[in-house]
Image (cartoon, rainbow, N blue to C red):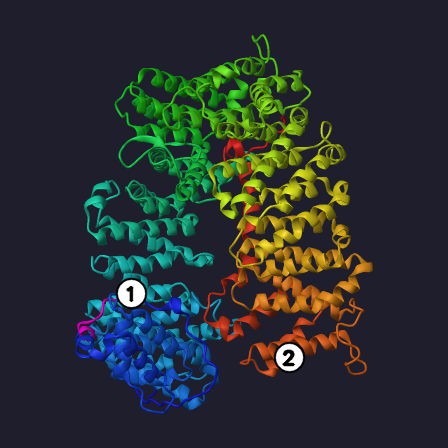
């Protein structure tokens, strides 16, 4: 039969050859001893010209027999890291791989090559031919390749010694066979599965490799197929595997029952695990499979982990009919019983995990996956009287596994605890809201009719253990800046660990649910641990940290009364601990925990002014503590409290003489005396936040307090200006420039939080600030004129540029925050914008590219977005100054000036959105430049820029369509070129992430033409045939374009595709599917990861999930962090 036959043919062909992606090439291993001996014996290969000569002989098309020995020599040089001719040899191999008929030599290479890497090279070119040219090969060539590969696989896998020595080569050969199967099976090779099963029963050695092939096939069809084969092909292969699976299953069952060969049994279990994700359920539940796995293989140490993988796949099956629930209950009870023979649920696993073998550690990890997966999928099914004990025992096992000191294992367990706590909370909350009393679940609790209470009672002891684990292992919140480094020192954190932040979020939610379920238990555990910290019995940095992080994480989960009772104890104990502990590091750790905890409870602080005042004054103390990170955290916490409790500071409180902010501003110089500049800026940001509150209860004189607040920076600014009046050169002193930068940054932070009232402050130094900008611009230009472009790297020039940037950033923030009554759009456009235009635009236009600040583009983007029609008259002047000179900077290549690129396109998008008419008030040559720049953006390899370009083009087309007086001229000049450009970007394989917008644009443009909204001819009327129409012309034009660009496409394929493009009944999702199937048919796409083409669906689904999740989190007290809650009263 075809499985055991072997034949090979080599027939040349002239079909276009697509090179195999060089990135897929395996890393070169060390050269073999044979390679060294050949290199030593062949002196002609020692020199570069020898390698080149060998390469030329291999590439020669003179019909001579292919010299495999010569290939061995070239490959040996290419894969030898110390060979001086390695680069030349690599180049020769790449040229050889580009040769159209090299694949016809694959059989000779595989049979006669002595160097293992040569054989891999042969397989590589054969793989390439199968992937990209299979369908254009004559049937006899396809049959020859298929028979040769099958024969070679059988030859190696029949001999145990050969299979061991050729293990890596056989694995690659198996993959090649699967590539053929993806092309040929089932339609041209219907007997493959029966042949494979039949041959497996002849030899255990052969059977072992056949199992590997089946495993690979299952992975290819069910895991990796989505973006490499068209939908219909995937469907056919899945149906074939399903229909023929009975033969595969009975082969697996036969092996498991009768084989004594450990390696065969292991690979069979591994193969079975791949199948269990998709096979018909009857093979799982109506056979002896689970019994065999559970009772024969799970107790055996050698097979335990592979068996557990199989059981995990079964355990994770979801959305099944209720009739399967008893079978899952039986499986879980049997598993827990078998697990009890290995270790008891009371066993402490931390030491066995630390000191055990690798297999034991893997077992504990896989046990976590099994228990977590089973509980997430079938928790409700296990909540019956007969399985209740097994369920609780299984949960105790999961608690023990959770205690293991391994982050990944804990995260697996955490998913189950999060699910369980969430589920119990929802049940409990539902019954509380509706007051239900009827029993829903048969829990066998002696007539207790309250199902929610029954569940809580049943899980109570387990949940206490879970709370202890959560509190002991609490992850670090991102607000905490003080950490213990690898040397055991307390330092300021330098980088954020995103995994830890994500873990904290999940742990926080879990602990919030657990607190809702039993607040007293959570409180008792936390307070007992805190007592152990205060009395020193369990004192350690880690213990205090995890405890305080856990305390901070449950903010909002208690009622206000419970929270008050709990926090009064916590804060008093922590403040006492800070007073009593000695040592800078100890105090820094305690300080960071105090600041984190108080920052998480703004509700408590708002309700208890005395505590709030005490906490803020304590923060002011910490601002004088020079231990790394303490001052930063004090300023951050102060900002957080100021944001959430700002009204408390600006209104008069009980027993106070004046609002707190008045005292704060008076004593401000003392408070910030030890802070670094960036900390001072954070402090001003916090006070600005307080002053932004203009509610009816606020009676303070906000403008007067702003004047008082800005006294220090204004005094320093005035002093600098007075010195400059006397001696202009003083402005160029480095220390003076740095002081100007600090003042501007302080103003920027204040402006960002205080809002529109900042206009009062800006007026006091606005013109002086613009003069400073102008003075620095002129000095920089003069220096560059004298010394050339290298002057931009001089220290003084860079410092002056920093000052200019701060001016621009302050203006950006001011424009963005402007609004009535102090700074309405009209007042800003008339009072602040005209003085800005000349010094900033003129400087940008005149400067060399390296001295142009991208913040200028951001400033005018903000101006256009904020002031809209108020600024439309100034847009042509702005574009004249920044457009062409910036475009020249960014179109030289795709790398230079990255900040200018994205900001330039954001500016174009803002003008297109808010001042569209202004685009047609500029000269025609500039209009063409705008369209050209958008096309350039579309073709950019940076995703954010290409996406921006696509969005601008879409908005531009929509705006053009709404403006009849310019639409037809625009279509005549640009439409055809734009269609071609979008096609080019869509098919270049570099922009798959933009597929949604490609489809949107093409559908929009094709439907414009098909629905006769383009009335002006897109063709040359003088050369067109009589009666020519735009739809007919475009159809013919696109067809020719596709046929010339993709020679492997047939005319019928192109005609079918183009017909679909003009189908106005296609909605966007259907249109995208039409485009996707066309792209995946292209051989350029067929071998690549095409998941980007499906990105929009994934993003839409993710967006819906996030919205639903946010709505749910808002409904559960404590799930939203205090910083995420919008206060209605502020």
Quarter holding the C terminus is: top right
Quarter occupied by residue 927: bottom right
**Crowd tier of the residue under label 1, counting other residues whose Cα lies within 10 Å: few below 14, some 14–19, many 20 or above:** many
Residue at figure coordinates x 29%, y 20% from the top left: 583
Judge whether residue 34 is colored magenta. Answer: yes
**Crowd tier of the residue under label 2, counting other residues whose Cα lies within 10 Å: few below 14, some 14–19, many 20 or above:** few
Quarter holding the N terminus is: bottom left
The residue sitting at the right extreme is 965
Closer to the camera, 306 or 593? 593
Residue 687 spot, x, y in % from top left: 56, 23
Judge whether residue 764 is colored magenta. Answer: no
Above or below 295: residue 720 = above
Quarter occupied by residue 89: bottom left
Closer to the camera, 427 or 892? 892
Find the distance from the CA under tag 1 to the CA under tag 2: 54 Å
Position of 1091 compared to 119: left or right? right
Residue 285 spot, x, y in % from top left: 37, 63
Q: In this rendering, which labeled residue sits more in front, label 1 or label 2?
A: 2
Residue at figure coordinates x 20%, y 57% from the top left: 301
Q: Between disc 1 and disc 2, whose residue precedes?
A: 1
- Residue 158 visible from this viewpoint: no
Instruction: Return the residue at label 2.
Output: 1040
| The disc label shown at residue 269, or none | 1
Position of 763 compared to 212: left or right? right
Q: What element carries label 1?
A: helix
Q: What stretch is highlighted in magenta?
A: 29-36
Q: What element carries label 2?
A: helix
- Residue 232 visible from this viewpoint: yes
């Amino acid at each position: 039969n075809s499985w055991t036959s072997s034949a090979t043919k080599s027939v040349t062909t002239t079909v276009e050859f697509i090179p195999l992606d060089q990135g897929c090439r395996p890393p070169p291993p060390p050269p073999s001893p044979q390679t060294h001996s050949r290199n030593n014996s062949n002196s002609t290969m020692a020199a570069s010209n020898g390698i080149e000569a060998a390469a030329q002989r291999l590439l020669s098309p003179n019909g001579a027999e292919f010299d495999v020995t010569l290939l061995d020599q070239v490959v040996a040089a290419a894969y030898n890291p110390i060979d001086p001719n390695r680069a030349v040899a690599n180049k020769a191999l790449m040229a050889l791989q580009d040769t159209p008929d090299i694949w016809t030599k694959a059989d000779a290479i595989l049979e006669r090559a002595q160097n293992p890497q040569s054989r891999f090279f042969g397989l590589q070119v054969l793989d390439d031919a199968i992937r990209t040219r299979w369908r254009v090969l004559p049937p006899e060539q396809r049959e020859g390749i298929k028979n040769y590969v099958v024969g070679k696989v059988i030859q190696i896998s029949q001999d145990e010694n050969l299979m061991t020595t050729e293990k890596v080569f056989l694995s690659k050969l198996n993959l090649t066979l699967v590539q053929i199967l993806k092309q040929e099976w089932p339609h041209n090779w219907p007997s493959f599965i029966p042949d494979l099963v039949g041959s497996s029963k002849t030899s255990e050695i052969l059977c072992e490799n056949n199992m590997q092939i089946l495993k690979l096939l299952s992975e290819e069809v069910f895991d990796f197929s989505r973006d490499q084969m068209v939908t219909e092909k995937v469907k056919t292969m899945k149906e074939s595997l399903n229909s023929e699976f009975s033969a595969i299953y009975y082969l697996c069952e036969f092996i498991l029952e009768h084989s004594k060969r450990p390696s065969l049994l292991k690979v069979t279990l591994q193969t079975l695990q791949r199948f269990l994700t998709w096979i018909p359920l009857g093979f799982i539940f109506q056979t002896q499979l689970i019994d065999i796995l559970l009772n024969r293989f799970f107790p055996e140490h050698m097979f335990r982990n592979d068996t557990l993988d199989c059981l995990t796949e079964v355990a994770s099956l979801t959305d099944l009919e209720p009739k399967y629930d008893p079978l899952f209950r039986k499986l879980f009870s049997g598993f827990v019983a078998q697990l009890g023979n290995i270790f008891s649920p009371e066993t402490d696993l931390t030491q066995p995990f630390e000191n055990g073998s690798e297999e034991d550690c893997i077992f504990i990890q896989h046990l976590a996956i099994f228990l977590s997966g089973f509980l997430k999928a079938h928790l409700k099914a296990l909540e019956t009287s007969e399985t209740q004990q097994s369920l609780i025992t299984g949960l105790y096992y999961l608690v023990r596994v959770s205690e293991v000191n391994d982050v990944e294992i804990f995260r697996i367990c955490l998913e189950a605890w999060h699910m369980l706590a969430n589920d119990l909370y929802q049940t409990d909350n539902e019954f509380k809201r509706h007051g239900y009393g009827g029993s829903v679940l048969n829990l066998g609790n002696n007539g207790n009719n309250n199902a929610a209470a029954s569940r809580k009672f049943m899980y109570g002891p387990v949940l206490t253990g879970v709370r202890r684990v959560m509190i002991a292992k609490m992850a670090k919140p991102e607000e905490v800046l003080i950490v213990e480094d690898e040397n055991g020192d307390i330092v300021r954190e330098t980088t954020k660990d995103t995994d830890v932040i994500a873990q904290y979020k999940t742990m926080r939610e879990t602990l919030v649910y657990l607190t809702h379920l039993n607040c007293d238990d959570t409180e008792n555990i936390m307070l007992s641990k805190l007592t152990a910290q205060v009395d020193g019995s369990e004192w350690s940095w880690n213990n205090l940290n995890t405890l305080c992080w856990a305390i901070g994480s449950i903010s909002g989960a208690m009622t206000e009364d419970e929270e008050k009772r709990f926090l009064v104890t916590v804060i008093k104990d922590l403040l006492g601990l800070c007073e009593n502990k000695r040592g800078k590091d100890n105090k820094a750790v305690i300080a960071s925990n105090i600041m984190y905890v108080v920052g998480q409870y703004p509700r408590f602080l708002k309700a208890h002014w005395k505590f709030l005042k005490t906490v803020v004054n304590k923060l002011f103390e910490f601002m004088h503590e020079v231990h790394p990170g303490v001052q930063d955290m004090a300023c951050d916490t102060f900002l957080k409290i100021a944001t959430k409790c700002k009204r408390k500071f600006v209104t008069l409180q009980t027993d106070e003489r004046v609002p707190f902010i008045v005292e704060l501003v008076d004593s401000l110089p003392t408070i910030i005396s030890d802070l670094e500049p960036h900390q001072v800026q954070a402090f001003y940001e916090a006070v600005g936040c307080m002053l932004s509150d203009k509610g009816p209860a606020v009676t303070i004189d906000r403008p007067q307090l702003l004047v008082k607040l800005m006294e220090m920076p204004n005094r320093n600014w005035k002093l600098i200006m007075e010195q400059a009046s006397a001696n202009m050169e003083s402005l160029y002193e480095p220390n003076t420039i740095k002081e100007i930068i600090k003042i501007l940054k302080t103003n920027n932070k204040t402006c960002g939080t205080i809002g529109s009232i900042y206009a009062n402050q800006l007026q006091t130094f606005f013109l002086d600030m613009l003069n400073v900008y102008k003075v620095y611009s002129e000095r920089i230009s003069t220096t560059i004129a004298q010394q050339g472009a290298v002057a931009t790297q001089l220290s003084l020039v860079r410092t002056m540029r920093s000052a200019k940037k701060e001016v621009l950033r302050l203006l950006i923030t001011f424009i963005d925050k402007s609004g009535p009554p102090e700074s309405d759009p009209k007042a800003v456009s008339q009072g602040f914008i005209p003085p800005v235009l000349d010094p900033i635009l003129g400087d940008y236009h005149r400067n060399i590219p390296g001295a142009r600040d991208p913040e200028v583009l951001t400033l005018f983007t903000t101006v256009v977005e904020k002031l809209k029609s108020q600024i439309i008259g100034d847009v042509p002047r702005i574009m004249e100054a920044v457009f062409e000179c910036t475009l020249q900077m960014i179109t030289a290549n795709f790398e230079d000036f990255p900040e200018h690129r994205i900001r330039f396109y954001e500016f174009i998008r803002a003008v297109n959105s808010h001042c569209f008419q202004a685009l047609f008030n500029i000269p025609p040559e500039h209009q063409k430049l705008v369209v050209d720049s958008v096309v350039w953006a579309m073709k950019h390899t940076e995703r954010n820029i290409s996406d921006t370009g696509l969005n601008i083009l879409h908005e531009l087309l929509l705006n053009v369509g709404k403006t009849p007086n310019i639409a037809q001229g625009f279509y005549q000049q640009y439409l055809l070129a734009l269609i071609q450009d979008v096609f080019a970007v869509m098919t270049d394989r570099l922009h798959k992430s933009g597929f949604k917008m490609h489809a949107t644009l093409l559908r929009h443009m094709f439907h414009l033409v098909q629905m006769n909204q383009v009335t002006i001819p897109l063709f040359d009327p003088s050369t067109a045939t009589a009666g020519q129409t735009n739809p007919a012309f475009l159809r013919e034009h696109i067809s020719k374009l596709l046929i010339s660009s993709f020679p492997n496409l047939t005319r019928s394929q192109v005609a079918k595709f183009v017909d679909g493009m003009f189908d106005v009944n296609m909605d966007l999702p259907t249109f995208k599917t039409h485009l996707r199937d066309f792209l995946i048919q292209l051989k350029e796409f067929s071998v690549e990861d095409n998941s980007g083409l499906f990105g929009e669906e994934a993003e839409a689904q993710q967006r819906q999930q996030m919205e639903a999740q946010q709505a749910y989190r808002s409904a559960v007290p404590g799930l939203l962090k205090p910083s995420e809650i919008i206060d209605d009263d502020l």
